[in-house]
Amino acid sequence: MSSPTDYVPPKVWTWNKANGGRFASINRPIAGPTHDKELPVGRHPFQLYSLGTPNGQKVTIMFEELLAAGHAGAEYDAWLIRIGEGEQFGSGFVAVNPNSKIPALVDRSGPTPIRVFESGAMLLHLAEKFGALLPKEGAGRAECLSWLFWQMGSAPYLGGGFGHFYAYAPAKIEYAIDRFAMETKRQLDVLDRRLAESQYLAGPDYTIADIAVWPWYGGLAKGLLYGSGEFLSVQDYKNVQRWADLIGARPAVRRGRIVNRMQGDPKSQLRERHDASDFDLRTEDKLAAAS
Ligand SMILES: N[C@@H](CCC(=O)N[C@@H](CS)C(=O)NCC(=O)O)C(=O)O
C-alpha cells in the first residue's frame, strides 16, 4: 500500500476553503441560505426542483411511471437547479429543503402546498398518494420499504465514498479507494444475490424500490458512474446486469432519466420539463444519446 499522508489533524478543525476537491467551491460546513431567490412555480400540481443526477432521476422516473400508468394528476414541472453554481443555497430552495440538496418537491395538489425533501420520502409520498408502485400491506410492503431504505443508507458509500475518492478527490488515496471499492462491491453482491432469487427487488412486481436503486446501481453496473466499470468488474454481477437492462428498457425510465440532465451529449438532455410534449420529436435522439 502507498504511504499515508503526513497530515496530523489539528486540535480544532477549521474550514480550508480551497481544499482542491471537485466540489470545494460549493461545500460548506454551515447550513442555511446564502442569498435571496424565490423559486419559480409552474402550472402543474407538482413542482420539482432538481438536477439529473441519480438522486434526481429517481423522482422524474417516478413521475413518468405514474403518468404512463394513467395517473393524470401526477403532472409535474421539473425546474433545473444548478448545484455547481450554488442554486441549492437560494432562500426559496432552502425553504423547501433545509438540507440544500436536490431533489426538492412541492406538492401543490391540495389547498396547502406540502414540501417534501429526500428522494426516498418523495417516492413514498407519491406512491401513497396515487396508490401505485408500493405493495399495500404485509411482507411485500415491508420488503419494498426495506430495499428503498437500503438504497438511501447505502448509496452515500457509493457516491460520497467510492465515487468521491476514485474520481473527484485531488489525490488518489489508496486506503480510501480500497475501503470504499470493497464496500461498493459488497453492495453489488447484496443486490446480485437478491436479484438471483427475485425478478425485482421487492418481489415479482416493479416498485419504488427498483426506481430508487436503479439510477445508482443500474448506472454503476452499466459502467456509467465514475468511469469505474472495469475497475469494479461490474460485468461479474450477472443478476444486477439482467435487472439493470430490464428497468433501463422501460419507456418511462428512458424519459425520466433525461429530465434535468446537464451532462453528456446535449441531445441527451431535457434540461427542464413542463409538459409531456417536451419529449418532442427529438426524443428518440435524446433517449438514444443517453444510453
Ligand atoms: N439523500 C439525499 C441526497 C441528495 C444529494 O446528495 N443531492 C446532491 C446531488 S446528487 C446535491 O444536491 N448536492 C449539492 C450539495 O451537496 O451542495 C436524497 O436522496 O435526496
Image (tube, rainbow, N blue to C red):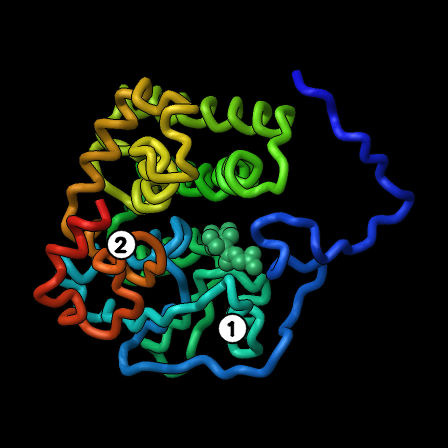
The amino acid beneath tag 1 is Phe
Q: CA distance from mark 1 to mark 2?
A: 28 Å
Can you name the residue that lies furthest to the right here? 11
* Front in this rendered view, residue 28 or 127: 28
37 shown above or below 58: below
Tell me if I can see residue 131 in this picture: no
In this rendering, the label closer to the viewer, 1 or 2: 2
> Is the C-beta separation of discs 1 and 2 under 8 Å?
no
Near-viewer residue (34 or 154): 34
Q: Residue at x 38, y 49 (%)?
A: 54
- Name which of mark 1 and mark 2 comes first in the sequence: 1
In front of the other: 281 or 188: 281
Is 116 on the left-hand or right-hand side of 64? right
Residue 285, picture quadrant: bottom left
Crowd band around label 1 with a 10 angstrom C-alpha radius: few (<14), some (14–19), many (20+): many
- Residue type at mark 2: give it: Asp
Residue at 28 percent across and 82 percent down: it is 43
For the C terminus, give its image quadrant. top left
Disc 2 secondary structure class: loop
Name the residue that disc number 2 marks.
265
| Number of numbered discs on residues | 2
Q: Position of residue 140 (x, y in %)?
A: 31, 36
Q: Is residue 137 above or below residue 182?
A: below
- Determine the residue positioned at 8% across, 65% down: 281
| Residue 93 in the image: above or below residue 1 | below
> Which label sits on residue 93?
1
As drawn, the label of residue 275 is: none
Which of the 4 image quadrants contains residue 112? bottom left
Q: Residues within 10 Å of mark 2 (few under 14, many from 20)?
A: few
Residue 233 coordinates in the image, percent (x, y): 37, 21
